[in-house]
Image (cartoon, rainbow, N blue to C red):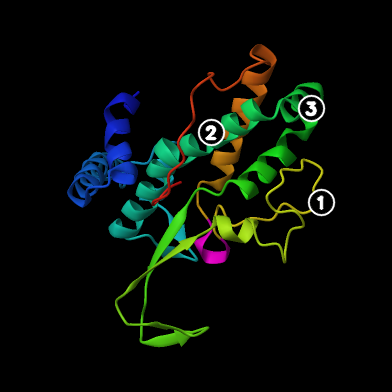
Amino acid sequence: ADADYLLPFADKTTRSPIAAEQNAGFSKVVEYLEEHLRARQGKPGNDLLSLIANGEIDGKRLDYQEALALSSLIMFAGLDTVVSSMGFFMRHLALHPEHRRRLIEDPARIPAAIDEILRRFGIANMGRTVAQDMEYNGVTMKQGELVLLPTALYGLDERIHQRPLEVDFDRADSRHLVFGSGAHRCIGSMLAKLELRILLEEWLPQIPEFQIKPGETPRVRSGKVN
């Protein structure tokens, strides 16, 4: 119900080239979440924010900052990251009618197609701070420097995937790191895949034929989110 209010702030946070606008957008979303988290502490409902506000991990109650961090991750993933993925999905299907028609004829291939398109068009780029001076493969990195880790590169590694730039719905192994891995796996990954599945299942039967508007070239950009 509050999407129209929140979307502009999410857009600034991930897409604005101006740091001050990014920070201002993030702060607005956090303010919104704080109000809802505090209302749920000790008074849980049956929604996801209630589970986080009153949640435990390995028997330890989440403190407020942990709950806020998890909530923020889910909020931005739902408002922006999945939306960006949808753009790549629909662009690919618009440019590849043979893939589009195959999913229409065989909807059972949709789950495999989702992982394959996610592998090919990775979305998230993770920032990390160098903890101590070190050298890796001849590259010197200093404590405090920032490193950007584009998760898309794993899915495009030819040592792991044959013909990695080709989208193949029959690929036996569509492993990717779009949702991270291990302890850092995205908490909303199952929700994201559900949203993408619903998009394809609802759109394709109703609008089976579509294409990029003639003369238009969709722009692709990198950043926190591709």
Q: Which residues are magenta?
A: 181-185
Say above or below: 22 vs 2: below
- Tell me which secondary structure the magenta stretch mostly adopts: helix
Say above or below: 207 vs 94: above
Please name the residue that numbered disc 2 is placed on: 86
Q: Residues within 10 Å of mark 1 (few under 14, many from 20)?
A: few
Mark 3 belongs to which amino acid?
Answer: Arg
Outermost residue on the front side: it is 215
Mark 1 belongs to which amino acid?
Answer: Ala
Q: Residue 102: which numbered mark, if any?
A: 3
Q: Is residue 70 left or right of residue 34?
A: right
Q: How far apart, in angstroms, are the residues tagged by discs 1 and 2? A: 23 Å
Q: Residues within 10 Å of mark 2 (few under 14, many from 20)?
A: some
Q: Residue at point 62% right, 33% down?
A: 92
Please name the residue that numbered disc 1 is placed on: 172
Q: Which element is circle 3 on?
A: helix
Camera-side residue of 166 and 21: 166
